[in-house]
Image (cartoon, helix red, strand yellow):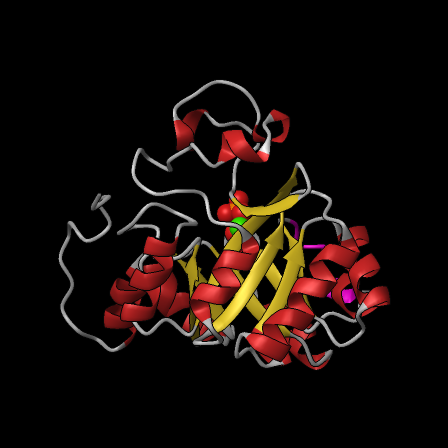
Amino acid sequence: MLLIAHRGASAVAPENTLASFERALDAKADGIEIDIIEVDGEIYVFHDRYLERLAAQPGRIQDLTQAQISTLKVFGQHPIPTLQETLSFLQGRCLLNIEMKSEIDTHRLAALLDWACAEQGFANNQLLVSSFDHHWLQSLKNLRPQTLLGALTASCHLDYAAFATTLEAWSAHIDINVVNSRFVEDAHQRGLKVFVYTVDEAHDIAWLKKMGVDGIFTNHPQLSRNILEGLPVSQNSLLRQF
Ligand code: G3P
Ligand code: CA
């Protein structure tokens, strides 16, 4: 079962920052998941629509300029990286799942994926683009057919993973609250991988492993690895450590 660091190792460093990616690599995570949003002609790695929780100021990130965004610090500590900086930092050292949180200029994103493969050490099968908006994914697939897509859902549909087949996705990414063995079996019969978000608890990890899911998004890849390997873990491991 793959361990994908959710927003980087976000339990131990500010989420979606180079520091959280470094900690994920330290933990030997199989992959890193990031959120991207396009603002003022640049693609940033950032999860929220509003700045309050992460950057301690009112308003939407969407309404700022590049100059204003460059002054922000996530949890008062680390700058908001661009997607380009993130690709350059990671250099293909693990799988990267890029989740589109806003509509992104498809040509800009496709060009960055091409650049990552040509010049930054990524193989095409290390770049997985996901979104809850399947129209955005379809546009990217039309422009860049070799892109691996992850079709996100927070629902268990009547026809299970059919939506992911329609999209020609590589994987279906589903909320832990609605995943079940029927969904996993249907997805596997369609040749899809199944990744489940967001999973940090030992009981859930054991349950999903038994169900045969292919990977989980976890905020604490080191803790999840220890749980998978049956090593002792501290009760306080999930308390925020920064
Ligand atoms: O990509 C899986 C998961 O990250 C989706 O939810 O809100 O954490 O971006 P969220
Ligand atoms: Ca996400």
User: Tag count in the figure?
Assistant: 0
Residue at 43% across, 21% down: 57
Main secondary-structure element of the magenta-colored stretch: loop
Write down the quadrant of residue 8 in the picture: bottom left
Where residue 113 sits in the image (x, y, percent)? 66, 67
Residue at the farthest right position: 142
Question: Who is closer to the viewer here, 226 or 138?
Answer: 138
Q: Is residue 158 visible?
A: no
Q: Is residue 48 above or below residue 230?
A: above
Q: Position of residue 145 (x, y in %)?
A: 81, 73
Instruction: Give above or below for 61 relative to 172.
Output: above
Taking 225 as reference, is 238 above or below it? Answer: above
Q: Say whether residue 112 is left or right of residue 18.
A: right
State the residue in front, 110 or 140. 110
Provide the residue span drawn in magenta: 155-162
Q: Is residue 157 magenta?
A: yes
Residue farthest toward the front in the current orientation of the protein: 67
Q: Quarter-wise, where is residue 72 in the image?
A: top left
Left or right: 18 with respect to 38?
Answer: left
x and y, in percent, of residue 77 in the image: 29, 39
Picture coordinates of residue 89, whole percent (x, y): 43, 65
Please check the rendered image and state whether residue 66 is part of the magenta-colored stretch, yes or no: no
